[in-house]
Image (spheres, rainbow, N blue to C red):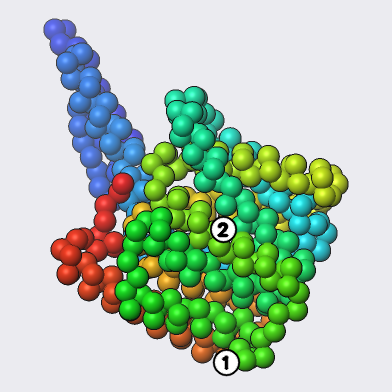
Amino acid sequence: MLTIQNKSNNLLTNQVICAINAHGRICVFRSPAGPTDQKSYEERQRCLLTEPIRKLKGLTNHIFVLAPALVLLWGSFAAVSKLALSSLDAFQLQFYMFGLACVALTILLLINGRLGELRRISKKDILRLVLISVPSYLYYFLYTLSLKLLPAVEASSLNYIFPIMIVLFAIPIQHEKLSLLKSVSILAGFLGTLIILTNGNILRFKMTNLAGDLLAIAGAASWGIFSNYLKKNRVDMMLSNYIFALTAFAFSAVSMSVFSRFRLPTGATFAQVLWISLSNIVVSYFVWNRLLKKCSSSLSASISFLTPFATLLFIMWLLGERITPAQLAGLAVIVTGIFLCSVSEIYTGKKSGKALPKKAGPR
């Protein structure tokens, strides 16, 4: 920044300030000569400094940024959790996962000076958020338990019916209508998920443990309920997520004290738990909430069908497994389902005269 200072006997000091903005252009403006110009001067400076941040926030409002980010975050959960579960049990994993999330969110609120805003939330809203967080906690609790009882393919396949649960629970909770195209797209996505996770052997897919199967299905249903009530939430995302994490941490602390024991993770296990916590508890909640507010439940569900493919990529990278032709065929079926759901969204938007989800502005 270059500053040129001019002085005269009868005038206040003035400064001509040259700065380079985010586009590489030189901006020249004069500092205030008196108190009346101070406000506009400060606004110009603040605008110059915050322009890149505003552009970044605007970028995170686009569905084509939110959807791939969510797929990658969710896709890492299965592979990294499997590695962590080799040293910790399900109760210990959840305790540290939600505990680290609480620490991270507390630091974020302190840095942004927003921790005190929790006191401004009404008791009614806090109670509502605590109730909403219950199905969210149950999803991780039940899914993690199912991974201990079932083969990973079977547990993951049953867990990936959560997009169907989202659409089904949207009928009574969101009062959304299930059109024929949306129904076909959901079925196509579910079929593609089964092809990927069973390597094409759908007819030979067998349930090996009834208790584990019921846990996985109940976990998927829990996420369907949580996603629909989260879409109706009007409390700030960061504050809501903080309450979600605190509630889940309280539940996990009780469950670990009753059904397990305290054990500190070390080395690679700690790094794995830290990644699961930050990527799937801290970041993915914000991304998923924004995505739900940008599009209908059916389109959100179809987008989430890409998660199994991302999961395969992480498994290939971390565990050295290869992607088979049957898994690629399953991905093609999933993409077909997403296309059908997109066509349905466009048709519904034009027919009702409403803006399409991808054009929706910040809420």
Residue 101 placement, left or right of 288: right
- Disc number for residue 3: none
Up/down of 219 relative to 206, above or below: above
Up/down of 212 relative to 33, above or below: below
Up/down of 195 relative to 158, above or below: below
Tell me where residue 213 appears, x and y as whole percent: 69, 71
Residue 255 placement, left or right of 134: right
At label 1, counting other C-alpha atoms closer than 10 Å, the crowd grade (few under 14, some 14-19, many 20 or more) is: few
Residue at the spot x=31%, y=46% of the render? 363
User: Can residue 278 be seen in this snapshot?
Assistant: no
Frontmost residue, 84 versus 243: 243
Q: Quadrant of residue 187?
A: bottom left
Residue type, numbered disc 2: Ser
Tell me where residue 53 appears, x and y as whole percent: 37, 44
- Disc number for residue 222: 2
- Residue furthest toward the front? 172
- Disc number for residue 325: 1
Residue at the spot x=64%, y=56% of the render? 140
Q: Secondary structure at mark 1?
A: helix
At label 2, counting other C-alpha atoms closer than 10 Å, the crowd grade (few under 14, some 14-19, many 20 or more) is: many
Q: What is the number of callouts on the image?
A: 2
Instruction: Return the disc, 1 or 2, that comes first in the chain's sequence.
Output: 2
- Between the C-alphas of marks 1 and 2, the distance is 32 Å
User: Can residue 49 be seen in this snapshot?
Assistant: yes
Query: Disc 1 vs disc 2: which is toward the camera?
Result: 2
Residue at the spot x=38%, y=41% of the render? 234
